[in-house]
Amino acid sequence: MKKILTLTALGVVLACSNANASGFFLKEQSAAAQGNAYAGATAGAEDISYSFFNPAGLTRHKGTQIELGGTWISPNSSARNSNNEFGEHNDYMGNIVHPAASPMAYFSHQINEKWTAGLSMNTPYGMITKYGDDWSGRFHGTLSKIISATFTPMVAYKANDKLSFGAGLQIQYIEAKLRNGVRKDLQVAVIEDKATLQGTTVDLGYQLGALYELNEGTRFGIGYRSQVRHKLQGDIEFDGLLGAMGMNQDISTRLTTPASLTIGAYHEINNDWAVMAEYNRVYWSSFKNLVIEGEKNGQMSFTPERWKDTSFYAFGVSKKLDEQWKLRLGIAYEQGAVGTEYRTPRIPDSSRLWYSAGLEYKYNDKLTFNVGYTYIDADKAKVNLRGNHYGDEGRGAFNATYTNKVNILAGSITYNF
């Protein structure tokens, strides 16, 4: 029983991945910032969507504003030469990461000269990966689907002409569905079944930020997003014999999503040109173990994960083409969070390069449009699971090589009342 629950529930955390971000943290929350590959996201404060990275930037926006937008994420992730210790082999597995849409909405209201309130609605996690039920890596995962929504009420305070502070409360909902093959030795025979896990949770975190304006054209920002301690509650169901044997039951697992610290700078060279930079550190090393609790059996498994902290570096430039149009360009490098020994088919994560471009069109003083495009070229991701980790007895060893590329298109409309 312990092995079966480990097989299925391990993916609760890992299924949050998408090929466009290390681990399972998605940056795609601003069409304007995406045009610069998120360089200057904590310092630019160019529209209210930048509050996702630094709520202190809301003090730069007057009156009442609303921004609506969305991102279309189209990854291409293929597995080659996959094989398991049971002698099964697949030469090539199609595109196993499905496209997804990520909506976003922001609202801000200037209360007075000192205080500004805001609200954001985002989907920071979301993906579908799907393999055939009979592929060679089925014991490590065949379906990983997650839907999320985060609501963040925020407040920003302008201490003086140079310094602002901001804070927000993250209210986060996650729904996950996972599926994989199960292999169990009953001594008299080895049977194979298929298992599905579903679970949901709503939990709280916070964010903090500060913005320092050296002068009208130069500013520095810092943003911090806290850990969010999740406890997913759900159930596990088997398609065949194991379900008939009474293996179905309620389970839960705890997950602490990592804290992240971001520092950025923005500088206007003249009236037309601006440059910006960003550094982001995500503290994935907090994700050390995964413990599964069963309703009937108490602690069912203990799985070491051993993820590592990652860094993200971005540089960007923008050029005002005229009074209405602005061009944005950016490049970034992002480290992967998982090493070869612990990388799984659910999250073929690796380091990657971002190439971004964007356009802004200011229709008038009230209405602004933004579009951003990013192409991500990821390193090859090798999976080399040797089957010797605690809890691997039922899954076995598995090897594969992944190639990952991503196209991202974002758009938004901002209206100033």
Image (cartoon, grey):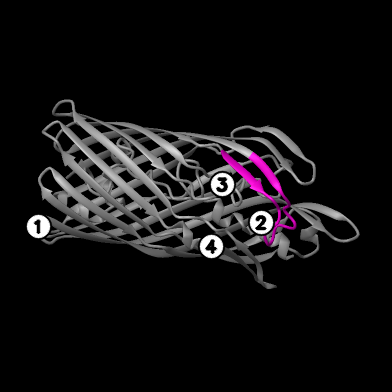
| Secondary element type, mark 1 | loop
Residue density around tag 3, few if under 14, some if 14–19, many if 20 or more, within 10 Å: many
Depth-wise, is mark 2 or mark 4 nearer the camera? Answer: 4
Pointer 4 residue: 288
Q: Are marks 3 and 1 in contact (CB under 8 Å)?
A: no
Q: Are marks 1 and 4 in contact (CB under 8 Å)?
A: no
Seen from the viewer's position, the closer of residues 146 and 375 is: 375
| Whole-percent x, y for residue 289 in the image | 56, 64
Marking on residue 347: 3
Seen from the viewer's position, the closer of residues 284 and 34 is: 284
| Secondary element type, mark 3 | loop
- Which residue is located at x 18 percent, y 25 percent? 321
Q: How many marks?
A: 4
First to last magenta residue range = 381-400
Name the residue furthest right. 188
- Which residue is located at x 20 percent, y 50 percent? 220
| Whole-percent x, y for residue 45 in the image | 22, 46
Q: Quadrant of residue 372?
A: top left
Depth-wise, is mark 1 or mark 4 nearer the camera? Answer: 4
Mark 1 and mark 4: Cα distance apart in space: 45 Å
**Lower position in the chain sequence, tag 1 or tag 4:** 1
Mark 2 and mark 1: Cα distance apart in space: 53 Å
Pointer 2 residue: 8
**Lower position in the chain sequence, tag 2 or tag 4:** 2
Residue density around tag 4, few if under 14, some if 14–19, many if 20 or more, within 10 Å: some
What amino acid type is highlighted by mark number 1? Glu
What amino acid type is highlighted by mark number 3? Ile
Question: Height in image: 233 above or below 213?
Answer: below
Depth-wise, is mark 3 or mark 1 nearer the camera? Answer: 3
Mark 2 and mark 4: Cα distance apart in space: 18 Å
Mark 3 and mark 1: Cα distance apart in space: 46 Å
Marking on residue 123: none
